[in-house]
Amino acid sequence: MRPKPLTLGVLIAIAVVAGQALLIPLFAAPAANLAPRDLPLAVAGPPQLAAQLEAQHPGAFEITQVADPAAADLKIKDRAVYGAIVVTASGPEVHVASAASPTVARLLTQAAAGLGATAPPTGSPGSGGGTVPVRDVVPVDPDDPLGAGFGAGFLPLAITSLLAGVLVYFLVPRRGARLAALVTFGALAGLAGAAVQVEWLGILPDHYLAVAGSLGLFALAVSAAMTGLAALAGRAGLALGAVVMFLVGNALSGIAAAPELLPQPWGAVGQWLPIGAGGTLLRSAAYFDGHGGRLAVTVLSAYAIGGLILVLIGRDRIAGRTEVVPVEAAPELAGAH
């Protein structure tokens, strides 16, 4: 027995409000509780310096002791750490990589302000006007000095990739054609996205092919996963993909800050979802010659390959309905496809 229209309307309103009550803390709580949590940091100096940092900021940093400033900078460029505190002849310095996270660069500068140095700041990007000199080892693109364009430019690709996966499921009836559509979309989305961000807007460094490859893999991962889930479970699969990969994934991605600034374990969880992994890979490809992007490549490849496999074993859409085609029957139906 179907509920009456009034009852159905009330139930829909209650369900939407309940979803809203869950979504607000999902997005607001991580943003309101940004703080370093085991943030990788190098220290080139006496052991007392590391002890001082740990005492002043308990639990904030995961400190790696290195031999000298050159070793610290190498760690930064390899994305093993977000920054470094180094001791030179003139006193402590902060080395940061605003390309890895402008937010972290500012936090590290503030954290180092209590080290007791009196030298003036260098005025490099990421400096917070403290008393410790700051050196930006890997700066953001000068056309995006605050790094805001990076996150803002990534979100539209996530939306369009999700939409592409939905459209391929509903409008492309056969599995072979779906595979071709998804691979084509991933390739074109990467090339076009890189052209816009690198060549047109100039908000990313001129590493066109690396940026295009990263964006293309991300676009394929999201779109293929969406189509694959739909082919396996229909509309329920689409709903699951949208909630997990987009709503939850966006809130836990850490693109605007850093995963280590989010409440744990949610920052780590976000790196196992496409948006978080995609943001990490794009930073690595654009600014760090691919360093630090191995896990992200693995995660995105798993979503892409897994989604394409689900498309192969899932449902075709024939004459407005769905048909489950057993894998064993695929050769006999090849001519019909």
Image (cartoon, rainbow, N blue to C red):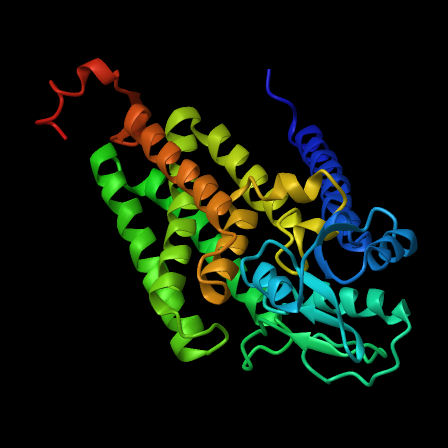
| Residue 106 position within the rendered picture, expressed as x and y whole percent measured from the top left | 75, 69
The reply, left or right, for residue 243 in relation to residue 54 is left
| Residue 213 position within the rendered picture, expressed as x and y whole percent measured from the top left | 36, 57
The reply, left or right, for residue 208 in relation to residue 172 is right
The reply, left or right, for residue 63 in relation to residue 301 is right
Q: Residue furthest left?
A: 335
Write down the quadrant of residue 49 in the picture.
bottom right
Camera-side residue: 56 or 18? 56
The reply, left or right, for residue 180 in relation to residue 239 is left
When the figure is inspected, residue 195 is found, relative to residue 213, above or below; the finding is below
Q: Residue at x 21, y 35 (%)?
A: 176
| Residue 248 position within the rendered picture, expressed as x and y whole percent measured from the top left | 63, 42
When the figure is inspected, residue 133 is found, relative to residue 214, above or below; the finding is below
Residue 61 visible (yes or no): yes
Write down the quadrant of residue 101 in the picture.
bottom right
Count of marks, rendered view? 0
Q: Residue at x 32, y 26 (%)?
A: 315
The quadrant in which the C terminus is found is: top left
Residue 174 visible (yes or no): no
When the figure is inspected, residue 68 is found, relative to residue 37, above or below; the finding is below
When the figure is inspected, residue 229 is found, relative to residue 87, above or below; the finding is above
The quadrant in which the N terminus is found is: top right
| Residue 163 position within the rendered picture, expressed as x and y whole percent measured from the top left | 43, 49
Q: Residue at x 80, y 54 (%)?
A: 35
Q: Which residue is drawn at 70% across and 40% down?
A: 266
